[in-house]
Amino acid sequence: MPDLKLTVNGIEATVLADPSTSLLSVLRKHFHLTGAKYACGEGQCGACTVMVGGEAVRSCVFPIHNVGQKYVETIEGLANSAHLHPIQQAFLDASAFQCGFCTPGMIMASVALLDRNPAPSVEEIRAGLAGNVCRCGTYSRIVKAVQSAAKAGRNA
Ligand code: FES
Ligand code: FES
Protein backbone atom coordinates (compact mmCIF):
# COMPACT_ATOMS: atom_id res chain seq x y z
CA MET A 1 0.00 0.00 0.00
CA PRO A 2 1.31 3.45 -0.85
CA ASP A 3 1.88 6.33 1.53
CA LEU A 4 -0.58 9.12 0.86
CA LYS A 5 -0.16 12.66 2.14
CA LEU A 6 -3.29 14.35 3.36
CA THR A 7 -3.81 17.78 4.87
CA VAL A 8 -6.72 17.72 7.29
CA ASN A 9 -7.74 20.82 9.25
CA GLY A 10 -4.35 22.33 8.46
CA ILE A 11 -2.35 19.34 9.67
CA GLU A 12 -0.39 17.29 7.15
CA ALA A 13 -0.07 13.59 7.77
CA THR A 14 1.04 10.54 5.87
CA VAL A 15 -1.42 7.69 5.73
CA LEU A 16 -0.63 4.12 4.76
CA ALA A 17 -3.84 2.99 3.09
CA ASP A 18 -5.28 1.59 -0.08
CA PRO A 19 -6.04 4.56 -2.39
CA SER A 20 -9.61 3.33 -2.78
CA THR A 21 -10.24 3.61 0.97
CA SER A 22 -13.00 6.06 1.75
CA LEU A 23 -12.01 9.44 3.12
CA LEU A 24 -14.50 8.87 5.96
CA SER A 25 -12.72 5.74 7.05
CA VAL A 26 -9.33 7.47 6.99
CA LEU A 27 -10.64 10.47 8.92
CA ARG A 28 -12.18 8.29 11.61
CA LYS A 29 -9.51 5.57 11.89
CA HIS A 30 -6.25 7.36 11.09
CA PHE A 31 -7.01 10.91 12.20
CA HIS A 32 -9.43 9.96 15.01
CA LEU A 33 -11.84 12.62 13.78
CA THR A 34 -15.25 11.16 14.52
CA GLY A 35 -17.47 14.18 13.82
CA ALA A 36 -18.32 13.00 10.30
CA LYS A 37 -20.64 10.03 10.74
CA TYR A 38 -21.13 6.73 8.94
CA ALA A 39 -24.82 6.14 8.27
CA CYS A 40 -26.01 4.98 4.84
CA GLY A 41 -22.49 4.47 3.46
CA GLU A 42 -23.90 5.07 -0.03
CA GLY A 43 -23.67 8.82 -0.49
CA GLN A 44 -27.37 9.27 0.19
CA CYS A 45 -27.78 10.89 3.62
CA GLY A 46 -25.03 13.48 4.08
CA ALA A 47 -24.06 12.41 7.62
CA CYS A 48 -20.45 12.05 6.47
CA THR A 49 -20.18 15.45 4.75
CA VAL A 50 -16.78 17.14 4.91
CA MET A 51 -15.10 19.73 2.68
CA VAL A 52 -12.42 18.87 0.16
CA GLY A 53 -10.83 21.87 -1.53
CA GLY A 54 -13.73 23.99 -0.31
CA GLU A 55 -16.44 21.73 -1.76
CA ALA A 56 -18.79 19.61 0.33
CA VAL A 57 -18.31 15.90 -0.40
CA ARG A 58 -19.82 12.66 0.85
CA SER A 59 -16.74 11.20 2.48
CA CYS A 60 -18.21 7.68 2.75
CA VAL A 61 -18.01 7.31 -1.03
CA PHE A 62 -15.03 9.60 -1.66
CA PRO A 63 -11.83 7.58 -2.18
CA ILE A 64 -8.73 9.13 -0.69
CA HIS A 65 -6.92 9.05 -4.02
CA ASN A 66 -9.40 11.73 -5.17
CA VAL A 67 -8.23 14.13 -2.48
CA GLY A 68 -4.95 14.85 -4.28
CA GLN A 69 -3.39 18.10 -3.09
CA LYS A 70 -6.66 19.55 -1.87
CA TYR A 71 -7.08 20.34 1.81
CA VAL A 72 -9.69 18.53 3.84
CA GLU A 73 -11.76 20.32 6.44
CA THR A 74 -13.98 18.56 8.95
CA ILE A 75 -16.35 19.78 11.62
CA GLU A 76 -13.46 19.59 14.09
CA GLY A 77 -11.58 22.25 12.11
CA LEU A 78 -14.31 24.90 12.08
CA ALA A 79 -14.05 26.43 15.54
CA ASN A 80 -10.97 28.20 16.79
CA SER A 81 -9.81 27.91 20.37
CA ALA A 82 -11.92 30.88 21.46
CA HIS A 83 -15.06 30.76 19.34
CA LEU A 84 -17.38 28.42 17.54
CA HIS A 85 -17.71 28.97 13.80
CA PRO A 86 -20.70 31.33 13.20
CA ILE A 87 -22.70 28.46 11.67
CA GLN A 88 -22.01 26.23 14.67
CA GLN A 89 -23.13 29.08 16.93
CA ALA A 90 -26.25 29.62 14.83
CA PHE A 91 -27.17 25.91 15.10
CA LEU A 92 -26.68 26.11 18.86
CA ASP A 93 -28.72 29.31 19.21
CA ALA A 94 -31.56 27.87 17.09
CA SER A 95 -31.43 24.44 18.83
CA ALA A 96 -31.19 23.03 15.32
CA PHE A 97 -30.69 19.42 16.43
CA GLN A 98 -32.10 16.72 18.68
CA CYS A 99 -29.84 13.66 18.71
CA GLY A 100 -27.12 15.56 16.82
CA PHE A 101 -26.17 12.65 14.55
CA CYS A 102 -26.78 14.59 11.34
CA THR A 103 -25.45 17.88 12.72
CA PRO A 104 -21.78 17.76 11.66
CA GLY A 105 -22.80 16.92 8.10
CA MET A 106 -25.56 19.56 8.12
CA ILE A 107 -23.14 22.19 9.36
CA MET A 108 -20.48 21.33 6.78
CA ALA A 109 -23.10 21.37 4.02
CA SER A 110 -24.32 24.74 5.35
CA VAL A 111 -20.77 26.13 5.32
CA ALA A 112 -20.43 25.07 1.67
CA LEU A 113 -23.85 26.53 0.87
CA LEU A 114 -23.07 29.94 2.41
CA ASP A 115 -19.65 29.98 0.72
CA ARG A 116 -21.45 29.59 -2.62
CA ASN A 117 -24.39 31.81 -1.78
CA PRO A 118 -23.95 34.12 1.22
CA ALA A 119 -27.58 35.29 1.15
CA PRO A 120 -29.74 32.29 0.28
CA SER A 121 -33.53 32.36 0.28
CA VAL A 122 -35.43 29.77 2.33
CA GLU A 123 -35.99 27.79 -0.88
CA GLU A 124 -32.28 27.93 -1.69
CA ILE A 125 -31.39 26.74 1.81
CA ARG A 126 -33.86 23.86 1.51
CA ALA A 127 -32.50 22.95 -1.92
CA GLY A 128 -28.88 23.31 -0.79
CA LEU A 129 -29.40 20.95 2.15
CA ALA A 130 -31.85 18.61 0.41
CA GLY A 131 -29.30 15.80 0.32
CA ASN A 132 -28.74 15.90 4.08
CA VAL A 133 -31.19 13.79 6.06
CA CYS A 134 -32.25 14.54 9.63
CA ARG A 135 -34.11 11.61 11.11
CA CYS A 136 -35.21 13.78 14.04
CA GLY A 137 -36.96 16.16 11.62
CA THR A 138 -35.38 19.40 12.81
CA TYR A 139 -35.44 20.85 9.31
CA SER A 140 -37.31 24.06 10.14
CA ARG A 141 -34.83 24.94 12.88
CA ILE A 142 -31.90 24.07 10.62
CA VAL A 143 -33.24 26.48 7.99
CA LYS A 144 -33.61 29.16 10.68
CA ALA A 145 -30.04 28.56 11.83
CA VAL A 146 -28.67 28.95 8.30
CA GLN A 147 -30.76 32.09 7.75
CA SER A 148 -29.46 33.51 10.99
CA ALA A 149 -25.82 32.66 10.14
CA ALA A 150 -26.27 34.27 6.71
CA LYS A 151 -27.73 37.39 8.29
CA ALA A 152 -24.92 37.55 10.85
CA GLY A 153 -22.39 37.20 8.03
CA ARG A 154 -23.98 40.07 6.14
CA ASN A 155 -24.00 42.23 9.27
CA ALA A 156 -20.42 41.39 10.25
S1 FES B 1 -22.95 8.01 5.32
FE1 FES B 1 -22.16 9.09 3.65
S2 FES B 1 -23.89 9.88 2.63
FE2 FES B 1 -24.72 8.62 4.21
S1 FES C 1 -30.76 15.82 14.97
FE1 FES C 1 -31.07 13.66 15.00
S2 FES C 1 -30.75 13.07 12.95
FE2 FES C 1 -30.75 15.23 12.87
Image: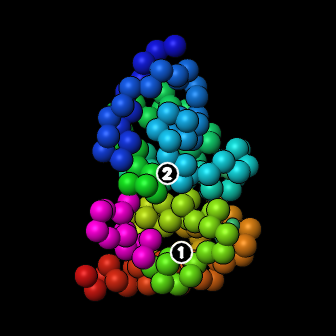
- The percent coordinates of residue 134 (x first, y second) are 69, 68
Name the element at disc 1.
Answer: helix
Q: Is residue 76 above or below residue 97?
A: above
Q: Which residues are magenta?
A: 78-89
Q: CA distance from mark 2 to mark 1?
A: 18 Å
Mark 2 or 1 closer to N-term? 2
Q: Residue at x 40, y 49 (%)?
A: 73
Q: Quadrant of residue 141?
A: bottom right
Q: Position of residue 99 (x, y in %)?
A: 67, 69
Task: Name the spot of residue 104 as percent of width and height, x first.
Answer: 54, 61
Pointer 1 residue: 125
The residue drawn where x is 55% and y is 20% is 18
Q: Is residue 65 above or below residue 78?
A: above
* Residue position marked by numbered label 2 in the rendering: 50
Q: How is the image coloured?
A: rainbow
Q: Nearer the viewer, mark 2 or mark 1?
A: 2
Hey, which residue is sitting farthest top in the picture? 1
Confirm whether residue 116 shows in the render.
Answer: no
